[in-house]
Image (cartoon, rainbow, N blue to C red):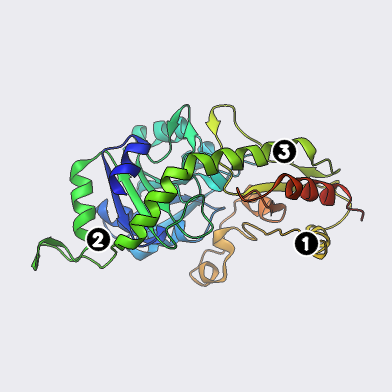
Amino acid sequence: FEDEFAAYLGVKNAIAVNNGTVALDLAVKALGLEPGSEIITPAFTFIATANCALYQGMRPVFADVDERTFNIDPDDLQEKITPRTRAVIGVHLYGQPFQLSAVQEICQDKNIALVEDCAQAHGAEWKGKKVGSFATGCFSFYPTKNMTTGEGGMITTDDDALAARLRLLRSHGDSGKYNHITIGYNYRMMNLQGALGLVQLRRLEEFTAKRISNARFLDDNIRVKGISTPFRMDSVRHVYHQYVVRVEDDFPASRQRLMEYLQDRGVGSAIHYPRAVYQQPVYRDMGYTDVSCPVAEDVSRRVMSLPVHPSLTADDLQYIAETMNSFEA
């Protein structure tokens, strides 16, 4: 599974672990940064992206996001860099790559590390190259992801020395049976999960093509005043882990009212995510009370995910669009 996943991305090394959060945790630990270093993450993402800095004694610093892609804003990232900044974790949110060229240039100019959070972006591409191959990549295989091993994760890198360190950390620092040369963890993936991953990986392009096709249908057929369908950059392959619409100011009702309307008619919807990470109670309790990322806060009040998964039938898609279009305040 590791070999085929590495080949799929075009990287030298893929290190399987037991979930995506562990992938992020080990990727940060393997950087070898001094405690108290700052790691910049987008303010609008799943909480694990920021937590992995805390796990290793670092301080997460939040950058605002682009109002169209919801990914990290390179301009605000630049503003958040301080002499204590040692790394950036960019997130390819919902399956759309962040602006890799701009973020890479910033990181190289400032001599800071870059980690790609690819948990939602298996097979996504930036200018024809797969995400997870630009820097240290971290993938999740949680059941809702574009491919799954039940639970599981993967770290990808072209750096052989980093890969060797990650393999040590993954399994008790064991360089040979009962020969432990560093403090490590039990973060291994089971062989059974790897077998499932192989089957899923070999079908990933099939799954992805269906997600993209489903998204195109919804783009073309949802026509609701005050609802914006997902923005997609020209330079990317968006793999639609989520199909996220945006509720605009001229929508005649609340987002919650629309979600209830859909639920009553058998159409699932969800909010990814209802608040910026620093607005979560645990971060408020840690003192993140003066952070301001206005776009992230605004987006969190507007986004709503609709079904896009590859098992949807043509009738399902038609029903989703018709139900959306039939909404009346």
- Helix, strand or loop at mark 2: helix
Which of these two is toward me, 227 or 88? 227
The residues tagged by marks 3 and 2 sit, at their Cα atoms, a distance apart of 42 Å
Tell me the tag on residue 99: none
Camera-nearest residue between 189 and 135? 189
Which numbered disc, 1 or 2, marks the residue closer to the eye? Answer: 1
Mark 3 neighbour class, 10 Å CA radius: few under 14, some 14 to 19, many 20 or more: some
* Crowding near the residue tagged with mark 2, few <14, some 14–19, many ≥20 C-alpha atoms within 10 Å: many
3 or 2: tag closer to the N-terminus: 2
How busy is the neighbourhood of tag 1: few (under 14 within 10 Å), some, or many (20 plus)?
few
Give the quarter of the figure containing the C terminus: bottom right
**From the viewer's perspective, is 236 left or right of 328?**
left
**Residue 101: image x %, image y %?**
45, 30
Q: In the figure, residue 220 lies in which quadrant?
A: top right
Kindly identify which residue carries mark 2.
Answer: 170
Residues at marks 1 and 2, CA–CA distance in whole angstroms: 43 Å
Q: Are marks 1 and 2 in contact (CB under 8 Å)?
A: no
Q: Amino acid at mark 1?
A: Gly
Q: Secondary structure at mark 1?
A: loop
Which residue in the structure is indicated by mark 1?
266
Residue closest to the far right:
328
At 52% from the left edge and 63% from the top edge, which residue is drawn?
A: 288
**Residue wearing tag 3:** 217
